Amino acid sequence: MKRDITIAAEVRTSRGKNEARRTRKAGQIPAVLYGAFQDPVNIVVNPREIVKITHSSTGYNTIFNLAIQGGETTPVMVVDQQVDPLRGNLLHADFKRIDLSKRIRVTVPVHTAGEAKGVKVQGGLLEVITRAIEIECLPDEIPEGFTIDVTELMIGQSKRASDVALSGSMKLIGAPDTVIAHAVALRAEEVVAAPEAAVVAPVAGAAAEPEVIKKGKKEEEAPAEEKEKGKKK
């Protein structure tokens, strides 16, 4: 989505780890601009301005203007970034030039709306499987996100990528049968009969056990009776 935002940048003349540290200490970060069959340009930008864009509602799909001091001003997108794993602050960013007249591929989030009948009426569960789809469209037509209605979903039914409503120049790139969300039965209900079956087995075994014990006692009692007869003789 094209936004009326302009970020200032300066050409970075020197490179290396030491120079990158000095740049960050000065409140800037190193970055690179490339794409549109033009030479890449090493630049420095204000990281706070970039974070505002990547954390906005349109995120990485935001198209904004990058104005290089003494150079070009061009529409760009943030296509990559390096973040400090401990502090979480932005360390480096990659920008790509965008030709507003050519289609581009983007990943757009998909949200669900409504309460599925499979949950409300049948007591099932709604599982969200895919939260974004890939589409191709003109830069000015990149949507902020898609919303798909799951109200009519019964247990065993699903909403797929092909059910997402596209408009204008939008074209689905991913597999159309990709499941976005589906209603399923609760797994706990499927195993209710298992404990009842387990109770039957010990009862049957308990009935057979005394019979074996009785036979054993009779066999043990037989020699004792023979001994008594021997004493009488």
Image: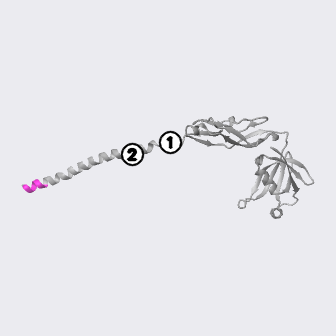
Task: Mark 2: give few (<14), some (14-19) or many (20+) Cα within 10 Å.
Answer: few
- 131 or 113: nearer the viewer: 113
The structure residue drawn at horizontal position 76% and vertical position 56%, both measured from the top left corner, is 82
Please indicate whether residue 154 sits to the left or right of residue 212 in the image: right
What is the secondary structure assignment of the residue under circle 2? helix
Image location of residue 1, percent across then percent down: 80, 43
Magenta stretch containing residue 50, yes or no? no
Q: Quadrant of the C terminus?
A: bottom left
What is the secondary structure assignment of the residue under circle 1? helix
Q: Which residue is mark 2?
A: 199
Point out the tag, 1 or 2, that comes first from the N-terminus: 1
Q: Which residue is mark 1?
A: 189
Please indicate whether residue 182 sits to the left or right of residue 224 in the image: right
Image location of residue 229, percent across then percent down: 10, 53
Q: Quadrant of residue 81?
A: bottom right
Q: Quadrant of residue 17?
A: bottom right
Chain part drawn in magenta: 227-232
Asked if labels 2 and 1 touch by Cβ distance under 8 angstroms, the answer is no
Residue extending farthest left: 233
Q: Amino acid at mark 2?
A: Val
Mainly helix, strand or loop, the magenta region? helix
Mark nearest the camera among 1 and 2 is 1
Q: Which mark is residue 62?
A: none
The structure residue drawn at horizontal position 84% and vertical position 60%, both measured from the top left corner, is 15
